[in-house]
Structure formats: C-alpha cells, structure tokens
Image (tube, rainbow, N blue to C red):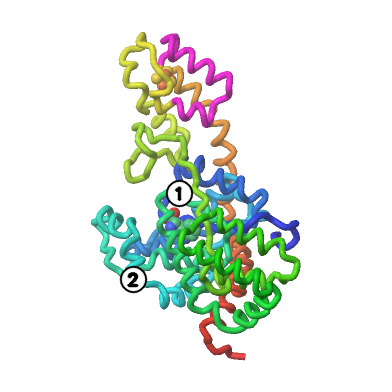
Amino acid sequence: MSETRPDPLPRIVSGMRPTGPLHLGHWEGVLKNWIGLQKDHDCYFFVADWHALTTHYEDPRALTSNTFGLAMEWLAVGVDPDRATLFVQSWVPEHAELHLLLSMVTPLSWLERVPTYKEQQQELRDRELDTYGFLGYPVLMSADVLLYRARGVPVGQDQVAHLEVAREVARRFNFLYGRGEPFEACLQSAHRQLGSTDRQRLAEWARQYRQSGSPELWSRIEDMLAGDARLGSGERDALIAEARGTGRTILVEPSALLTRASRLPGTDGRKMSKSYDNAIALRDTREVVTRKIRTMATDPARVKRSDPGEPDRCPVWSYHEAFSTEVTRQWAGTGCRTAEIGCLDCKNRLLEGMWAALEPVWERLGKLESRPEAVREVLAAGSERARREARITLDEVRDALRLARPQ
Ligand code: TRP
Ligand code: SF4
C-alpha cells in the first residue's frame, strides 16, 4: 500500500486505452518500463476507457471486455497492485470534473494545433472524428495527470505533444488563479525576509531569466533561494512562482518520461502495430506464435540456405536479443554468418526462448480469466485509492475557481 511505504520517488501517472489485445511490443516497451518504475516510484496506472470512447464511440460493444482484458494483461506480466495503484479512468469521476474545469481555460487554438489531432482525423477516415470529445482528448489527458500532481509521465513519442498541452494548461491555471490570497501575503512576507538588496538581485535575475529562458540563470535563482535560511518553504515557493512569472503551484507541471521504442519489429520487419497486421499478441496461442515466427521476414540477402546472413539486417535477430540466452545468441549469430544453420533452425531455437518467457504469462492470464471478480476488485480498490488522492487536488481547484462548497 502506498501509504505505508517509505518516501517514494516522484509520482508517476500513465494510462493505456483499452482498444484491443496488447502485442509483444507493448510488453517489451511500455509494460517492462512500468514494472521497473513501480519498484521505487509511487505509480498510478489506469485504463483510459474514456479516451477509448473518443475514437471508438460509434461501436463500444467491446469496451467492457477490453477494459478487463487490458488489466488482466498488466497483471499477468507483473504490474503489481501492491506496488502501484491500478484503476479505471471512468471509475474515478474526478477526471471528468477536472476535465470540465480545465476546458474553461484551455484556448481552442492549443488543441487545434496538436499535430496528432489533424493526423488522426486523416488516418482514421472511416470514423467520424469531428467531435467535441476528440478535440478535447489532450484536455482529458491533462486532467488525468494533473489530478495526481504527477511529476513524471511515461509516454511514447506520439504522446509528447499531448503532455505539452498539460504543462501549458497547468501553467495557465496557476497564472490565472494562483495569485490572489494567500499567495500575495506570502510573497510580501518573503520580500520582507529577503531585504531590499537581495530582493533587487533576485528581481533582476528573474527578469533576465524570463527573457532568455537560460537554465543556468534558473539554477542560480534556485541556489540562492534554497540556501536562504530566512525563508520558510511557502515563502520560497512564492518567490519561485514570482520569478517564473506564474502564480502559486495549484497544478504541478508534469514532465514526459520518454519510453524508448520497443526493439521488437513486426513480422514484416516494419514497426509492430495492429494496424499493419504484423503484430504478435501477448494472447496469441502457441500455434499462432509458431506460424508467425516461422513465416517472419529474415535477412533479405539469405535467399538460399547456403547464403551467409547478417543478423543485424534480420528482424528475427531482435527477438533473439529479447528472448534468447547468451548461448543461443552465440550459436545463432555464428551459424547465420557462416550459413551453418538455416533460418528455420534459427527460428525454432528462438521459439524455445519465447516459450520460456510467454508460458508463465499465459498461465497467469488463464488464472485471472477464471477469476474476473478478483480483477474487478483490484481495480475497484485502486479506483477508491485514486479517488481519495484526486479529491485533494480537485478541492484546491474548486476553491481556486471560487466554486461554493455545499458545507
Ligand atoms: N493517450 C495515451 C495513449 O493513447 C493514453 C493516456 C490517456 C495517457 N491518459 C493518459 C497516458 C495520461 C499518460 C498519461 O497512449
Ligand atoms: Fe535471421 Fe536467423 Fe536467418 Fe540469420 S539465420 S537471417 S538471424 S533468421
């Protein structure tokens, strides 16, 4: 439970849309990264079912089963509900409330210029994506991360522009609402503590920093304030906000933690993707995996069995790097370059390594599928925990917006 662990590293939030079975690329790239992060960070991982509706609203029939299916896949590969908070976005209605409130301050132009907006509309031509919800995709995503005051958000390259919107929204919100009382009082007392010489020095550095954006100047400002024993932490924060040109931090600006791309290509050698029809799903059966690997593209220079090959030009090799032992890799690398082994020999040995990795996952998936209620309970408990955390931010946001309280 997160409450009883010692101080974890900065909080992490990430989500995945439940749009169908995961493939090995998701496991290798995204999930192994999550599993590493959950060891020492306070992690919130959620099924972004509302985000799935932004593109799949016309036919939501599979949404429930995809939601549970995705959670089962996470659990089967080792995402651990005792370490990370696992939940369903739509079970935490605070995401919707914050989304609504953030939509009040988000300029339309920020959303229209997100590159994925026009691109996806082009790419998914068979869907009608001229909707309010689809345009607001990055606002909902901003709510997802700002609600938990996440410092780090592991995402792929395709999501970086969305996260940039989240940062801008947070900054704008703090600028608009973070400057009344008690911020001003705190700032004034901080100015008194500093005295006029230091105050002027700080103001001058801050002015230069806002003009140049120089990180070197920024660390000078931070060093000056961090080392000043006259200041309380509220006063220090107020001075920092003033120097940045923002208000008090009501919403924390998150950073993207770029997930490195999976090294596993698709069966045709291109990037693995469901839409290219070249993916190996985590749930593919042994027969299907065998067929996909046996028919997988290899080094194009190896036309005949007697032609030597070059593993670096072969997509199968990336799989050896992910699944085979050192001994197998030696054998395959040498055998390929000398033409001592054929591609089928090479692939059969690879399959042995893949079974060793996949069988335990399949076994856990089977168990989870026979106990769907247990999975629902994990998600329900995680959603409760997430709600408690979310309320803290949301109460501050409501107060900042001067929304009346019922009691
Ligand atoms: N948009 C993300 C994707 O398609 C999923 C997502 C939704 C997300 N909300 C998020 C990721 C918040 C990180 C943080 O991959
Ligand atoms: Fe690829 Fe293995 Fe064939 Fe070499 S022997 S080309 S590594 S499949």
Q: Is mark 2 within 8 Å of ligand 1?
A: no
Position in image of residue 149 (x %, y %): 58, 65
- SS at mark 2 in the image: helix
- Residue 18 visible (yes or no): no
Q: Position of residue 233 (x, y in %)?
A: 70, 70
Residue at the (36%, 21%) spot, across then down: 299
The residue drawn where x is 61% and y is 49% is 37
Between the C-alphas of marks 2 and 1, the distance is: 24 Å
**Label 1 beta carbon less than 8 Å to ligand 1:** yes
- Name which quarter of the figure residue 186 lies in: bottom right
Say if residue 171 shows up in the picture: yes
Going from N to C along the chain, the mark reached first, 2 or 1, is 2
Specify start and end residues of the magenta stretch as a single range. 317-342
Dot 1: element: loop
Q: Position of residue 237 (x, y in %)?
A: 63, 69
Looking at the rendered image, the quarter that the N terminus falls into is: bottom right
Q: Any mark on residue 404, and which?
A: none
Type of residue at label 1? Answer: Gly
Could you tell whether 232 is left or right of 44 in the image?
Answer: right
Q: In which quarter of the image is the C terminus?
A: bottom right
Number of numbered discs present? Answer: 2
Instruction: Residue under label 1, please give it.
Output: 156
Choose between 260 and 192: the one closer to the eye. 192
**Residue assigned mark 2:** 108
Query: Would you say 182 lies left or right of 166 here?
Result: right
Residue 324 within the segment the image draws in magenta: yes
The residue drawn where x is 47% and y is 22% is 348
- Relative to 18, is 367 on the left or the right? right
Left or right of 173? Residue 407 is: right
In terms of secondary structure, what is the magenta stretch mainly? Answer: helix
Q: Nearer the viewer, residue 350 or 68?
A: 350
Q: Where is residue 192 in the image (x, y as percent from the top left)?
A: 68, 78
